[in-house]
Structures are given as C-alpha cells and as structure tokens.
Image: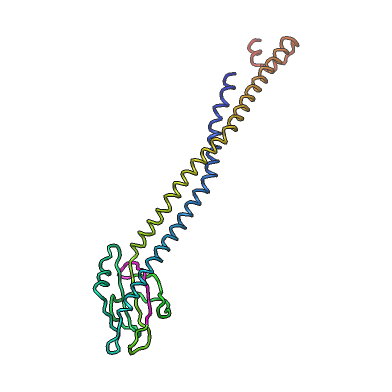
C-alpha cells in the first residue's frame, strides 16, 4: 500500500522540469534569435557608418591634392607640401596611397597601379569604391577635377586609397558599444522569464500534487473495497468467487 502512495509524487519532478524547460525554450529561443539578428544588422550599419566617415576623409585629402595641381608648359604638375607627405607616412594603422593621372590617362604623380573607378562622375563629385592594391584591400576615393591651362581640356583624375584597418577597428568598437547593452538586456530578460515561468508553474504543481494524492487515495479505496467484496463473497455468501480469483492458493490447500 505504501508503494502506491509514495511513487506518483516522485514522478512529478521530471514532469515539472520538462514543462519548465519547454516553456523556457519557447520563450527564450525567439529572444535569442532576435538578438543575434539585431547584432548582425548593428554590425552592418556600424561598418557602413565607419566607411562613410573615412570616405569623407579620403575626399578631403583628394580636395587638398587638387588645390596643389597646376600646369607648366601645358602639362599637369603637382607640388605636395611636406605636411601632406607626412600625413601619408604617419598613419599608425593604415597605409594611404594616391595617384594623379592627366586627362589622357598618363601617370603624373603618386603610387602607380591604383585600380581605376568603374564609373566617371562629373568634376568635383567623388566616386567611392573598393579595390586591392599591393595585396591589401583598400577603399578608394576618385575625384575628377578641371585644371586650367592644360593642353588637353579633359579632367584630371585624383585617386586616394586607404587600407581598412581603422574602419574595422571603429566598426568593432561601435558594435561592442551596442552589443554589451543587448547582452545585459538578454540576461535580464532571461532571468525575468525564468522567474515568471517558475512562479506561474507553482499553482499548477500544487494542483498536480492534489490530483496525485486524490488518485492515490482513490486507488487505495478501490483496493480496500475490492478486498472487502472478496471477503464478503467468501465469508458471508460462501460462494466460490474468491476461489476463482485465487485458484493457485486453493489448489495448494486442496
């Protein structure tokens, strides 16, 4: 009898744990998924913002170079001040390259072999694009400008290229700045969800315990009633019901 009463409550814990686990997974999985998607989108926008900021810097440098271009005997010449050359060599994170071609495409100054732009913009409007130079990925700003006094009336092409280290560092810093609050918020939401699930399952656990106790006593009552009925048939009615229920016992007796 004691086994019937004690076993069902022991089986209650795994059922409750399984239900809790399913609820937590159902609630937390979408939150984690949304957080991951948000992180990817945040990184994409962070890298775009970093790219845009440094693109403006390349454009400013191209404008500075355009102000140093002049003509001599109908040919394009450029005289960069020492400060501009120092800026090209003083960057501790990236390498900066530039190239100047005249209207015919002939090399004038700078670093040879920078990839040309895929499109030709109006003079004064920059074109930004990605390329490879010296085995490294670079971001390039191309600027067409009109230089008076040249033998060819076409625009001069100024290109300024920069490797991507600073852009990557800035994008990572922006991403970390946005990711830490998201992770802390995710942990807080997880704790609140766990607490809510645990608190919500308490009434259910109490009801399940009450149902188990009721069933135990019901089964116990059925067993007692069944035994009493068998004894009634054997003692009062004196029929062979108990003999049919326990034939092996009577066979041994006989």
Quarter of the image where one finds residue 229: top right
Q: Residue furthest right?
A: 237
Residue at screen point 50% across, 50% down: 33
Where is the C terminus found, in terms of image quarters?
A: top right
- Quarter holding the N terminus is top right
Task: Between residue 15 and residue 24, name the one nearer to us.
Answer: 24
Magenta-drawn stretch contains 192:
no
Q: Is residue 253 left or right of residue 103?
A: right
Query: Residue drawn 44% across and 48% down?
Result: 183
Q: Quadrant of residue 94?
A: bottom left
Q: Is residue 24 above or below residue 128?
A: above
Name above or below for residue 80 compared with residue 28.
below
Tell me if 139 is positioned left or right of 9 in this view. Answer: left
Residue stretch rendered in magenta on the structure: 133-145
Residue 134 on the magenta span:
yes
Numbered marks: total: 0
Q: Is residue 205 shown above or below 96?
A: above
Q: Main secondary structure of the magenta part?
A: strand
What is the x, y in percent for residue 137? 35, 67
- For image coordinates 33% across by 71% down, the residue present is 161
Residue at position x 52%, y 39% from top? 21
Position of residue 50 measured from the top left corner of the image (x, y, whole percent): 39, 63
């Amino acid at each position: 009898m004691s086994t019937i009463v004690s076993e069902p409550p022991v089986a209650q814990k795994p059922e409750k744990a399984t239900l809790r686990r399913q609820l937590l997974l159902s609630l937390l999985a979408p939150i984690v998924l949304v957080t991951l998607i948000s992180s990817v989108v945040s990184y994409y926008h962070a890298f775009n913002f970093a790219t845009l900021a440094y693109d403006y810097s390349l454009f400013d440098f191209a404008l500075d170079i355009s102000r140093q271009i002049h003509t001599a005997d109908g040919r394009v010449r450029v005289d960069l001040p020492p400060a501009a050359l120092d800026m090209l060599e003083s960057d501790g994170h990236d390498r900066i390259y530039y190239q100047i071609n005249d209207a015919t495409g002939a090399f004038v100054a700078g670093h040879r072999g920078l990839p040309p732009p895929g499109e030709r913009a109006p003079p004064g409007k920059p074109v930004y694009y990605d390329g490879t130079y010296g085995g490294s990925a670079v971001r390039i700003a191309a600027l067409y400008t009109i230089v008076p006094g040249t033998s060819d009336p076409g625009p001069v092409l100024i290109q300024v290229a920069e490797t991507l280290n600073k852009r990557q560092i800035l994008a990572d810093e922006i991403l970390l700045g946005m990711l830490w609050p998201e992770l802390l918020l995710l942990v807080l939401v997880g704790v609140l969800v766990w607490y809510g699930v645990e608190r919500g399952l308490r009434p259910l656990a109490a009801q399940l315990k009450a149902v188990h106790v009721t069933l135990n006593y019901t089964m116990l009552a059925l067993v007692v009633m069944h035994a009493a009925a068998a004894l009634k048939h054997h003692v009062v009615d004196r029929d062979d019901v108990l003999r049919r229920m326990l034939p092996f016992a009577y066979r041994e007796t006989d």
